[in-house]
Image (cartoon, rainbow, N blue to C red):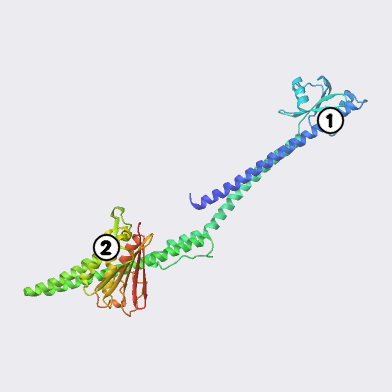
Amino acid sequence: MNIKSRLVASFAGTMAFILIVTSVLIYVFQSGYRTEDFHQRMINKGTNAAKLLIKVDEVDASMLRRIEKGNPTNLFRERIAIFNYKNELLYSSDTLNDPRFTNELLDAIRLKGEVTLKGDSSETIGFLFTDRYDRFVVLVSAYDIFGLAKLKNLRRILLYVNGFAIVLILLAGWLFANQALKPLNRVVSEVESIGFENLYQRVDVGNGKDEIARLAIAFNHMLDRLERAFKSQKSFISNASHELRTPLTIISGEIEVLLRKERSAEDYRTTLSSVRDEVQVLSKAANQLLMLAQTDNELPRQSMLDVRMDELVWTCREDVQKRYPKVVVDVVMNQDEGEAFEYEVHGNPNLLRTLVGNLMENAAKYSIDQRMTVRLSSGDDYFHLEVVNHPGDHELATRELFNPFYRGANSAGQRGHGLGLSLVKNIAERHGGSIQIDLKANEFRVVLNLPHQV
């Protein structure tokens, strides 16, 4: 069942339930009022008859019977019986003896004061009539032909009205659901028309206030992210192809030149050395691309260990100084050596080494004064690593530095692929951390925050 059908069914069911409950209550209250009103009329008739018989000396049973026979206010099928304190019948409006008028019933009336009986064709009420000298029991039986007819007519009206109302409710529910879901159907139609060839298209947000508008806005935000991801993917594929094609072209050219004619052993060694360098460049680019793809996913828990970040920094410092022997790396720690355990981080050792190594290599490669400073500090929840160098007076778009294959204006003459900082950002985020870049006063500062526990 679709949403429209469910809305119609829910709306119609709720309204029908309310109508039926209301109709039942109306009928029950009206039925109770009829019963109460009819019983009061029977009591009044019985009381008037008892007063005439008992308090008026000139009226006896036969005269009272003649009086009641011509009374225009008599009830339909009315029967009145009056008994004295000995349960002897003093008066009856007809000569028939009702088998229900037993001594047990009369005693119950004397005890309770009032008793009602319900028969198939009539209703009976018995009550106690008190005189100065005696206590009499009056029984009145009658059939409420007009009240019951009105009640039956009310029942018929309620059935017809409820049936007609339910049909109207179904029609109104269908129209209401159709109108309410029209904006949603429009949004669905617009979303279905959007593909990779028109990913720039956006969904109309309508009035921008109701729930459908919020849904359209959420779709548009999702489309913004998808468009950025799609463009990023296209750019990534294009840049990756270019970065991989360049060393492959160099290798192919070197080999082709070498094979054109016989060369000396020295020429072969020189060419093979050049090919080896390009293969290493190609291998590094492939490894970084693979690691960049891996860090887009959640890290397996079995690869997470407790890693001493201070030891990792010293190891990476040695690696950087082997590759860049002229660069001076100053390491500053804000804690005593005995408290070095505070630098422990729970994470993947290989990825964390790549993270620190890339930060330090990037600082060494682009430092104009051949110097960098690495500061380590630790708080209650986070480990902080700060790498500072001086890249010179260059325009750097700090927001773009974390994008794959982006290279700043100061990268001219430096070999690289622009994957280092994007890989650093991915690794930091996979460990629940964050990284910020601060560029001011000719100083390039990278601040890394990692939680002790992911």
Residue at image coords 76%, 25%: 111
| Placement of 74 over or under 86, stated as above or below | below
Residue under numbered circle 1: 47
For the residue pair 50 and 323, the one nearer the viewer reads as 323
Left or right: where does residue 143 sit relative to residue 377?
right
The furthest residue to the bottom: 393
Question: Could you tell me which secondary element the residue under label 1 belongs to?
Answer: helix
Q: Amino acid at mark 1?
A: Thr
- Which residue is farthest right? 58
Query: Which sits in the foreground, 404 or 95?
Result: 404
The image position of residue 65, as x and y in percent, is 86, 26
Q: Give the number of callouts.
A: 2
Residue 418 in percent (x, y) is at 29, 71
Q: Is residue 253 left or right of residue 19?
A: left
Position of residue 124 relative to residue 400, above or below, is above
Q: Nearer the viewer, mark 2 or mark 1?
A: 2
Residue 118 left/right relative to 201? right
Three-letter amino acid code at the position of disc 2: Leu
| Number of the label disc, if any, that sits on residue 251 | none
Q: Residue at x 70, y 38 (%)?
A: 152
Comparing 142 with 101, the one in front is 101
Asked if marks 2 and 1 touch (Cβ < 8 Å), the reply is: no
Instruction: Locate the C terminus by quadrant.
Output: bottom left
Label ID, residue 312: 2
**Would you identify the image quadrant in which residue 149 lies?**
top right
Q: Position of residue 58 (x, y in %)?
A: 93, 25
Q: Residues within 10 Å of mark 2 (few under 14, many from 20)?
A: some
Percent from the top left, x then y, of residue 220?
45, 64
Label 2 vs 1, first from the N-terminus: 1
Query: Marks 2 and 1, how far apart in space?
Result: 110 Å
